[in-house]
Image (cartoon, coloured by chain):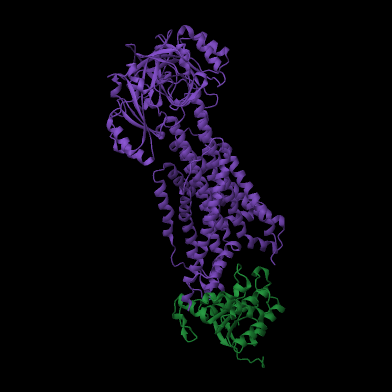
Amino acid sequence: MGTSGAGKSTLMGLLAGLDQPTSGSITLLGETISAMNDEQRAKIRGESIGFVFQNFLLIPSLTALQNVTLPMVLRGNEDDRSNNQKAKQLLKEVGLAGRETHLPTQLSGGEQQRVALARAFVTKPKVLFADEPTGNLDQKTAAHIIELLFKMNQEQGTTLILVTHDANLAKRCQRTLIINDGHSHENKCQESQC
Amino acid sequence: MLGKSLKVNKMTVSWSWREILFGQLWPVLVALTLIIACVVALSTLALRVEKVMTNHGRSLLAADLVFKSSNPIHPSLLEKAKQRGVTISAQSQFQTMAFSDQKMQLVTVKSVESNYPLRGELNLVGKNKTLQHQVNPGELWLSARLFALLDVSIGDNIAVGDAELTISGLIQDEPELAYNPFNSIPNLFMHASDLAKTGAVQVGSRVSFRLFVNGNASSLTALQKTYLLQAGESWIDENKQGRTASLINKAKQYLSLTILMVILMAAETLILTCLHYARDRSETVSMLKSMGASRAWLRLWLTTQVFIMFVIAFIVGCSLGLLLEFLLRLPLTDILPKQLPSVGLQPFLFAIGVALCIGLPALLIPLTRLLDAPAINVIQQQKTKYAKTSWWLLLLPFCALLLFYASNKLVWMVLLGLLALFVVLAGLSYGLLQLLGRLKWSAAFSLALSRINRSPKNSLMQLAALSGSLMLVALIWLIKSDLLGDWQQTLSPDAPNVFAINISPEEQQGYLEQVDTLALPRSDAFAIIRGRITEVNGQIASEHVANKEQLPNILKREINFTWVKQLPVYNPIIAGQWGGEKTVSVEQKVATDLNIKLGDRLTFEVNSQTFSATVNSIRSVKWQSMKPNFVFIFSEDVIADLPATWMLSFRVEQAQNELVNQLARLYPTVSLLDFRSMGHKIQGLLKQISWSLTGLASLGVVSGILLIFTLLRLSLGERKREITLYRTLGASKKRISHTLWAEYGLLAISAGFVAAIAAELILFSLMKWGFQLPTQLHPSMWLVLPLLATLIVFISLNSVIKDLLKPLK
């Protein structure tokens, strides 16, 4: 958690191996990703990491189903039938059964984020990074998306790293780090006490 | 694990397909298709027209290639021709007297073989209007004028040299054309086997020998290469045929220039649309990278798209190009032969080559840079650090240009001119916009100006793209108009086509009155005195020539002098001034050849009488204009007293045959040189070329305008986000459209002016040094270009404004 400009996204970029630290080292899933080059980090991301972004970032020219199968294609899973089956199953779980062939522009914001959730979970990542996943959504839809995110997270046993400035949302996490001016400290207060 | 993904799978292909259709790739595809379509259409048409023109040129020559010699054809050449398997036909040409019972006349005899002509049409009309196309042994065919001059008709006997022959009929059309009115002595055809009987060809007699040759290009070239030319021998092909050759060559140059300009315009669009696409897709690439896409995968992904685009562009472009060529050819149906010359694969290969040369760098440079989009951009925008840019790809079009156009002066002139001008003019217009920005304007204008000046690089790019296309459009059209204008002037439909020479001084007045009574448009009458130039400033003329190795023709023979009170208006003075006593005006080229300057004293000889005159002016003369023209024109006091005959030219329509005959009957001693059929042939050729050029120019202009339209729409599309934001913030429709109008209007008007200046300058250099034609200003263009630009802006703005004004959802 932290205010705007505190450095949340920078930290997340570093943790997920999207960026390189200028000093220090970062270890992710037992591998020192700060010592890796772009290609090696991309490989780690493809194999073990999932993302949910604030502005969804779906490919506009791909259908909902194709957007979901994309990470598997990037991984090299060529079996279209099994890819599609998995993607359809996930789209059903996020409540988008029957909308597989829609393009992102034909979906609402909430629906687009649900496609993004399905896409994030399709490769069963070990760690899932979510950057303000509800930042662009209205309250009701946001609540719905968060429920879905936590539910799927629990079912798949993924480590979820959530960047947010919503204190209520932060409370639902097991650990909360607060970043301020580039420094982070653990929020000690327990759900029950605050 | 990711390694095994380097295979094109179904999804990548279908995704590429969607990217092209729904993503921002379709303008790139359109530009690429346009390049291919234009190149296929233009080069197919150019090839066809060139072949038709070559055929036309060859039919005027009577063969594919002509060998001309003042000595009998050397047996070794005949032997070589036989070895090469080419078709040959020999001709001897000489001048001799022909006698009828009552009259005699100097004639040009062409003794030909039965297979003459190898190209072009020979129409001989015999007794009872029978038509035949070759000369047989024992036959004698006369040109129309000879019937009148010798007062004979078909079936009569005449003596040609020592031979007595019976007239078989009239020469209606013949392929070889003579251009010089003074060399045009009426001619007749006889068969080569009858030549000996005339006794005209003897040792020392002046005979011109020709060998007509037909064959494929390679054997013709080989024949020319293997035979060593002796003195007095030369080869003539359609490229060396006086006026027609220069017409054809200029038309060919224009064709290749138009193709180049259309390619330049399309390349410009391709580059801009591709840059636009790369900018638009950098977020997607970042996202794919965040999900673990390797560079290799991304490369494969982009290559698949490029490949699919090229394939579609080739298929659609080639078909579209053929359709376009067919449409362009429609107005030419009457002129082009029924059986069109085939063009083979050449245009398609050329189009593919051009598309690859332009398309590969235009697509791959921005796309490889796209690979460097950092993954972190999905959450935080960062400046991209480019690993390396494949600038070497730019060598591709550059080398191709060098390879194809290395020797084409015009092409390099256009390219260098473009480059230099744009640096200067872009700076100028940028300065102007900056200056405008400092002045006080209405809200809309201030906003527009501040926007233009805020991103100078972007604005300059747009300005360059817009003015570049406008300029090319203007160039394509204006070069065509200037070329055609010049040709039409040289050979206007009312140009004189009959010359009357040998008019005695006593007959002169009466003859002029008679021509006027018949209402035939005529030139002034000119005195003709035959003579030579002997000295320049006291030095023997042959020692005063500029190039000592080649003596100018003018020193080898007698030429025609004349005197006037006022110089003919169609001879513009280049230096000096007409007037003064004992003076002479000299034609420009001869002045250069003989190294003659204003004020030089020239000495002449007429009938062993010498006299001198001072050069008062240098004139430019259009020898092809079919008007009486002279190298030396004297003031009245120099030669008016010398014995002279008179000449004039006038216009006779095809149907006014009777008038010509009437004149011939009334003044039997006056020689009439009738150029009507030749003029008609050249008019036909001119019309043919004009149509093709107009068609080509129109195609160039239309595609240019379409490209400008695409560019503007793209640029407006890029502004969508900003404008939507203004709209969301409550800006009225009026305010937004006013600002857009002001911005793009300013851009259009300045681009219009920049284009006009650039076009004018390039046109000037092209005309002066490239086509070697008179230069002129084009004031209407200065108005039309900015207006055209504004109009295109209006249409493009109108087509997108509705979409732009939708508020954010």
Residue B663 rendering spot, x and y as whole percentages: 52, 12
- For image coordinates 46% across by 78% down, the residue present is A40
When asked about the image quadrant of residue B713, the answer is bottom right
Figure chain in green:
A
Q: Quadrant of residue B532?
A: top left
Q: Nearer the viewer, residue B266 or B581?
A: B266
Q: Position of residue B421 (x, y in %)?
A: 48, 46
Please determine whether, in this image, residue B284 is positioned above or below residue B113: below
| Residue B583 place in picture, x, y as percent | 40, 17
- In the displayed structure, would residue B5 be above or below residue B590? below
Q: Is residue B591 left or right of residue B566?
A: left
The location of residue B261, given as percent across then percent down, is 50, 46
Q: What is the tally of numbered marks visible in this picture?
A: 0
Colour purple maps to chain: B
Residue at the image position 54 percent from the left and 19 percent from the top: B652
For the residue pair B767 and B244, the one nearer the viewer reads as B244
Q: Is residue B384 visible?
A: no
Q: Residue furthest top?
A: B506
**Up-down relation of residue B222 to residue B573 (above or below):** below
Which quadrant is the C terminus of chain B positioned in? bottom right
Residue A82 visible, this angle: yes
